[in-house]
Amino acid sequence: MELIIVKNQLEGGKAGLKLLSQAMQNGAKTLGLATGSTPVEFYNQVVNSSLDFSEMTSVNLDEYVGLDGSNEQSYRYFMNKHLFDEKPFKENFLPNGKALDLDAEVKAYDQVIANHPIDWQILGIGQNGHIGFNEPGTKETVTTHVVDLTPSTIKANARFFENEAEVPKQAISMGLATIMKTKEIVLMAYGKEKAQALKGMIEGEVSIDLPASLLKKHPHVTVIADEAAASLLNQ
Ligand SMILES: N[C@@H]1[C@@H](O)[C@H](O)[C@@H](COP(=O)(O)O)O[C@@H]1O
């Protein structure tokens, strides 16, 4: 696991863009994308770059159950706004949060990923160490699945909604096994709220109590952290 410490999110976005450009030069065709506040500056950098995505495919990590793409809090809406409207891809996949049959939807999404193996995956990290929406205690072997969000994640994500009661209680998320299969991972962490999770991930034992720690077993992970997120590290 390689660690790049940057001054702030802007520098982190630039570092991420550099890694993405290299991956695309090396033939990456399918990008695994993430939402949340963490990758916003990275997407800004991408939008302002000369990179061309017209032959690229994207597969997103997750989506809230019950929200469709016209809902401003949906991850589809977020991705359109921050990236896809500005940089058209050949195709963009996200789980369908409005699917009537969620079992069928998770199977269909696994098939999408099987058809488009992810070359380069971007990740944020939850304050409790979740990646995607794989909360502590999730099985390491899961692929796409429906998740009951933990109270702490609902609370953390409430800032994007009018109030906490509006936050969906479930999401569809790529599983840990899916994430571990991606060829290259870039995880970004910014702010002191992420310092504890980052320390646990980098310096702690591999444990499902902190899902991001599994990434230690992945052969190609780069962590981009700002000074606040890296402030508890022993170095
Ligand atoms: N499902 C998303 C994750 O993909 C994201 O990495 C994390 C951190 O969010 P933020 O970047 O806003 O801190 O929480 C959300 O719950």
Image (tube, helix red, strand yellow):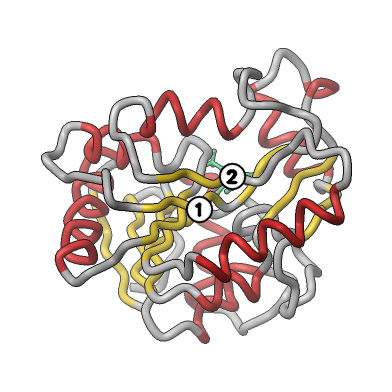
User: In front: 125, or 58?
Assistant: 58
Ligand 1 placement by image quarter = top right
Q: Position of residue 39 (x, y in %)?
A: 40, 42
Q: Residue at x 35, y 56 (%)?
A: 225
CB at mark 2 closer than 8 A to ligand 1?
A: no
Q: Quadrant of residue 69?
A: top right
Q: How many marks?
A: 2
Q: Residue at x 21, y 62 (%)?
A: 24
Q: Residue at x 76, y 62 (%)?
A: 107
Q: Residue at x 81, y 46 (%)?
A: 149
CB at mark 1 closer than 8 A to ligand 1?
A: no
Q: Position of residue 187 (x, y in %)?
A: 42, 60
Q: Position of residue 220 (x, y in %)?
A: 37, 79
Q: Tell me if 100 is positioned left or right of 91 in this view.
A: right
Q: Residue 59: which disc?
A: 1
The amino acid sitting under disc 2 is: Leu
